[in-house]
């Protein structure tokens, strides 16, 4: 299997923000990394600044339940900031592409669901 298993969650204000504690609880009980991704503008997704919840706000909310969440050292090129709580099995991470851009350190290539390669999530260019 894949270790760690990563579960990506795009959290949107007024849509699914009430689920952050459920997702984080899953990471506390299972050896997975729940990654909270800031809502980003893409073609035709109806992006609105008001729907985007900054990662810093999500971290503050999670610390009301897990005050000892501590940053975990990860690879310098990792696009996520990872946190773990004492006694927790997994971790929670934040991909802060809107509030803390990481483009300069990103070394990722992505495979889309339809089989295309993208070197940047924000770019329109894909290679088939």
Image: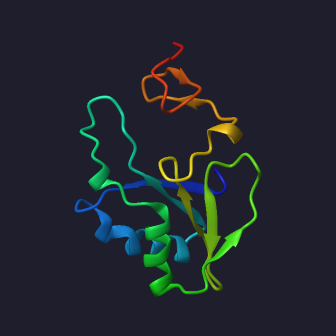
Task: Please provide percent x and percent y for residue 11.
Answer: 36, 58
Left or right: residue 117 compared with residue 26? right
Q: Quadrant of residue 40?
A: top left
Left or right: residue 32 compared with residue 55? right
Colouring scheme, one of rainbow, by chain, secondary structure, one colour? rainbow
Q: Quadrant of residue 72?
A: bottom right
Which residue occupies 48% across, 28% down?
112
Which residue occupies 50% across, 20% down?
116
Q: Nearer the viewer, residue 94 or 113?
A: 94
Task: Please provide percent x and percent y for residue 26.
Answer: 47, 72
Left or right: residue 102 compared with residue 74? left
Task: Please provide percent x and percent y for residue 82.
Answer: 63, 64
Left or right: residue 66 compared with residue 71? left
Q: How many marks?
A: 0
Q: Nearer the viewer, residue 3 or 95?
A: 95
Vertical position of residue 11 compared to residue 62: above or below: above
Vertical position of residue 117 compared to residue 85: above or below: above
Task: Please provide percent x and percent y for residue 54.
Answer: 43, 60
Which residue occupies 61% across, 54% down?
80
Q: Residue furthest top?
A: 128
């Amino acid at each position: 299997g894949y270790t760690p298993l990563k579960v990506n969650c795009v959290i949107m204000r007024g849509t699914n923000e009430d689920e952050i504690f459920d997702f984080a609880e899953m990471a506390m009980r299972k050896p997975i990394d729940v990654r909270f991704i800031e809502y980003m503008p893409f073609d035709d997704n109806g992006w609105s600044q008001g729907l985007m919840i900054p990662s810093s706000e999500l971290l503050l909310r999670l610390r009301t339940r897990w005050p000892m969440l501590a940053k975990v050292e990860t690879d310098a090129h990792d696009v996520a900031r990872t946190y773990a709580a004492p006694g927790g099995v997994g971790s929670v991470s934040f991909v802060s592409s809107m509030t803390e851009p990481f483009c300069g350190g990103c070394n990722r290539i992505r495979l889309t669901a339809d089989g295309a390669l993208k070197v940047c999530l924000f770019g329109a260019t894909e290679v088939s």
